[in-house]
Image (cartoon, rainbow, N blue to C red):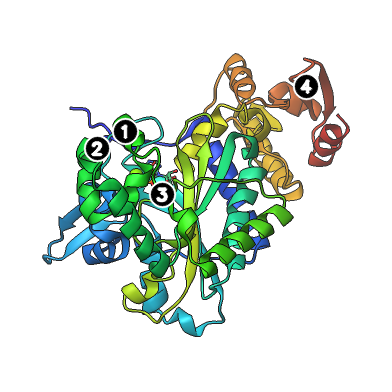
């Protein structure tokens, strides 16, 4: 019996892994430039963490979690997102006593039991950043700058729109929810079943329902953005000034309310023009640290979906740019040639650490070795057999031009030849 991978999971290798590595390298580079430190937290946590930290009424907690009892009868959940885990770690490790603001980034796999679609998996990866200990819009702007810099560096700026909104503080939101409830009261019967549930449990989320009939009823709905208190209004306008000053392009989308319960004030999403879905989102979550038992700590962060970034990059011929092409392949025939070849390869690897060097390790026929070298896009092939050893030479073939030359069999000559061609 063949065992297949689980629904919603994937194996990543060959060309795809190169795209993943390309994004990951840029993440590390950018995180360093912005002085953001990495954090790694466990893949599984107590289920309670997500019930309290993400919210019982969210899709994630109510429908999508991988929850099970372990052998010690503890309720365990595979992380569906990472903010709650990072906050748990922040509290548990007393990170509030470190200099604040504290900037942390993470990358890792998340697990959600979802219906499979393009760009929607049950195991997927997110890159995210959290900033603790700053209540200023400047920290909101910094998270936007980190994420938008990544999108720019990997060449996706033109494919993605940044939409921002403010969902206010608990005070102005409470007032707004009253206004929204009044507006929806005579209309809710015509709306979808999910919205009927949301009306009592998570009314804000009705605003971003995608159903046609709900959209129709929401035509003249009041938006939180138009009902902010003076403080929140000023914050939102300050944030926009900073973004404009930094030349970060954005649009205001009053319909963004985000799916997770813990957001307040700034919320934002990166939407792919092509896929029509979000590749990431973020916002401020000032109440989460205290909700999870920590000291009152303002915080803001984002998460980008790696898998969706990879999908977008795959359509952009990025591979030509990032492919790991072999600089020189050693085609070796016979035991002595393999001994000499191995030595040369190691010397070249040590002396020229920018070269990608590969060579025969399976005693293939001459034709098969050249075919393999060509499949790896080798620029040069260095051919060594008994004849060449007897004459103390090797044959270097330029795979692009097909031109072959004999040169003396030593590493300096080979390096000189490659550097000059
Ligand atoms: P969606 O509305 O697409 O379900 P979400 O609001 O559930 O997204 P978040 O929890 O904000 O998503 O996660 C941030 C990002 O993680 C998303 O914008 C997306 O790129 C990615 N993401 C979320 N769920 C999945 C999934 N099942 N498969 C792949 N990527 C995902
Ligand atoms: Mg979702």
Using the rendered view, name the quadrant where residue 151 is placed.
top right
In the depicted view, which residue is nearer to us: 255 or 87? Answer: 255
Q: Is residue 67 left or right of residue 308?
A: left
Quadrant hosting ligand 1: top left
Q: Residue at label 3?
A: 222
Residue to which mark 4 is pinned: 398
Instruction: Give neighbour class at mark 4: few <14, some 14-19, many 20+ (Cα, 10 Å).
Output: some
Q: Quadrant of the C terminus?
A: top right
The residue carrying pointer 1 sits among few (fewer than 14), some (14 to 19) or many (20 or more) residues within 10 Å by Cα, namely: few
Q: Secondary structure at mark 3?
A: loop
Q: Residue 211, labelled with which disc?
A: 1
Q: Nearer the viewer, mark 1 or mark 3?
A: 3
Q: Earlier in the sequence, mark 4 or mark 3?
A: 3
* Image vertical order of residue 298 relative to residue 147, above or below: below
Q: Position of residue 413 (x, y in %)?
A: 85, 36
The mark closer to the camera, 4 or 1, is 1
Q: Secondary structure at mark 2?
A: loop
Are there few (<14), some (14-19), or many (20+) residues within 10 Å of tag 3?
some
Q: Report, in whole angstroms, how far the alpha carbon at label 1 lies from the one at label 2.
A: 8 Å
Read off the residue under disc 2. Answer: 191
* Mark pair 3, 2: CA separation: 17 Å
Query: How much space separates mark 2 and mark 4, taking CA atoms?
Result: 68 Å
């Amino acid at each position: 019996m063949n065992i297949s991978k689980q629904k919603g999971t994937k194996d990543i290798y060959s060309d795809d892994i190169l795209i993943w590595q390309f994004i990951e390298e840029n993440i590390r580079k950018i995180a360093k430039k912005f002085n953001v430190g990495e954090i790694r937290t466990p893949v599984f946590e107590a289920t309670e963490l997500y019930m309290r930290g993400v919210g019982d009424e969210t899709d994630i907690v109510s429908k999508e979690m991988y929850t099970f009892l372990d052998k010690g009868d503890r309720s365990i959940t595979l992380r569906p997102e990472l903010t709650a885990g990072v906050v748990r770690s922040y509290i548990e490790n007393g990170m509030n006593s470190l200099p604040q603001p504290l900037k942390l980034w993470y990358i890792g796999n998340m697990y959600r039991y979802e219906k499979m679609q393009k760009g929607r998996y049950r195991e997927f990866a997110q890159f995210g950043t959290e900033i603790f200990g700053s209540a200023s819009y400047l920290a909101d702007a910094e998270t936007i700058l980190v994420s938008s810099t990544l999108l720019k560096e990997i060449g996706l700026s033109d494919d993605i729109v940044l939409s921002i909104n403010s969902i206010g503080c608990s005070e102005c939101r409470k007032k707004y929810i009253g206004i929204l409830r009044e507006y929806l009261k005579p209309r809710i019967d015509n709306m979808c079943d999910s919205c009927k549930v949301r009306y009592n449990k998570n009314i804000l989320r009705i605003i971003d329902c995608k159903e046609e009939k709900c959209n129709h009823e929401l035509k003249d709905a009041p938006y939180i953005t138009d009902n902010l208190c003076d403080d929140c209004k000023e914050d939102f306008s300050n944030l926009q000034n900073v973004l404009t000053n930094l030349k970060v392009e954005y649009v205001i989308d009053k319909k963004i309310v985000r799916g997770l319960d813990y957001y307040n004030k700034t919320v934002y999403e990166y939407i792919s023009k092509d896929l029509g879905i979000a590749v990431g989102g973020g916002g401020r979550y000032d109440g989460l640290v205290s909700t999870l038992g920590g000291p009152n700590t303002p915080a803001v962060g984002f998460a980008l979906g790696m898998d969706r970034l990879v999908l977008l990059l795959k359509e952009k011929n990025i591979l030509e740019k990032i492919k790991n092409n072999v600089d020189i392949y050693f085609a070796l025939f016979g035991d002595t040639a393999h001994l000499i070849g191995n030595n040369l390869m190691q010397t070249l690897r040590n002396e020229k650490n920018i070269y990608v060097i590969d060579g025969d390790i399976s005693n293939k026929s001459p034709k098969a070795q050249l075919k393999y070298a060509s499949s790896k896009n080798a620029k040069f092939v260095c051919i060594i057999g008994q004849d060449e050893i007897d004459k103390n030479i090797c044959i270097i073939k330029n795979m692009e031009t097909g031109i072959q030359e004999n040169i003396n069999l030593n590493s300096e000559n080979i390096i000189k030849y490659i550097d000059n061609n």
